[in-house]
Image (spheres, rainbow, N blue to C red):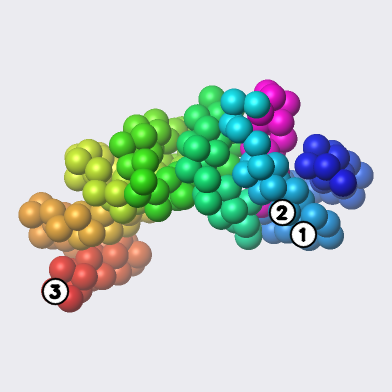
Amino acid sequence: MSFGQDVDDLRKWISEVWRDAPMSAEWQSEYPDWPDLWKSSVQFALSRPVASWSSDQLEDLLFALARDSEDELISEGISEDPEALLALSVAAIRQGESDAKWQLAARLGEMRSHRDRAIKLLLQFVEDPDEYVRRRALLALSALRAPQAEELAERAWQSGLEYQRIAALSVLAEIGSARLPAYVAEARADGRVYVLGAADKAVRGRVD
């Protein structure tokens, strides 16, 4: 079967079998024909120039990617072609679901060959309305040693959100920020269990 038909089959399965179920990665992973869709999605993305993708094909690829958020095999395969990954990330910023965006942000953080372009896209992902997308983008910026990572980590901390603070501590530790001790002290005052755990891990990372 073709990539387009495989995506249509997934959509049909969702509408017929799970039409009354809340959207979740857990039940979507039960789709029986994932191996076919994994293969055809990656083959499609890697076998033709990005410029030849139609808007419908882009939409199908983003749809399949978002449904694959438990296994992340589509994003893994597509990341073998930097141009495909970059093009899909641009499309996701415009029209993608959160479960597509965070996977792409994470893959961009592994991109060394097109670092500047990856950072530029991640700076858009880090402004996303979805907290998890912002968090994964921040961590990816840290992995690429983006010059904006420290400032964005501090902003994440100032949000007061628990998982944003956890990510901020991780980033500050990873980039070796001189400001980490101050935020570790603030984490002690914060007092939430997972924030405290992140602070301890950040300190150990600096020591190690």
Dot 1: within a 10 Å radius of its alpha carbon, few (fewer than 14), some, or many (20 or more) residues? Answer: few
Q: Which residue is mark 2?
A: 38
Asked if one can make out residue 154 in the rendered structure from this viewpoint, the answer is: no
Dot 2: within a 10 Å radius of its alpha carbon, few (fewer than 14), some, or many (20 or more) residues? Answer: many
Badge number at residue 35: 1
Residue drawn at 69 percent across, 24 percent down:
54
Q: Secondary structure at mark 3?
A: helix
Q: Earlier in the sequence, mark 3 or mark 1?
A: 1
Q: Amino acid at mark 1?
A: Pro
The majority secondary structure of the magenta stretch comes to: helix
Please determine whether, in this image, residue 199 is positioned above or below residue 110: below
Between the C-alphas of marks 3 and 1, the distance is: 44 Å
Q: Amino acid at mark 3?
A: Val
- Toward which corner of the image does residue 19 lie, by quadrant? top right
- Which quadrant holds the C terminus? bottom left
Q: Are marks 2 and 1 in contact (CB under 8 Å)?
A: yes
Q: Position of residue 145 (x, y in %)?
A: 24, 49
Badge number at residue 70: none
Badge number at residue 207: 3
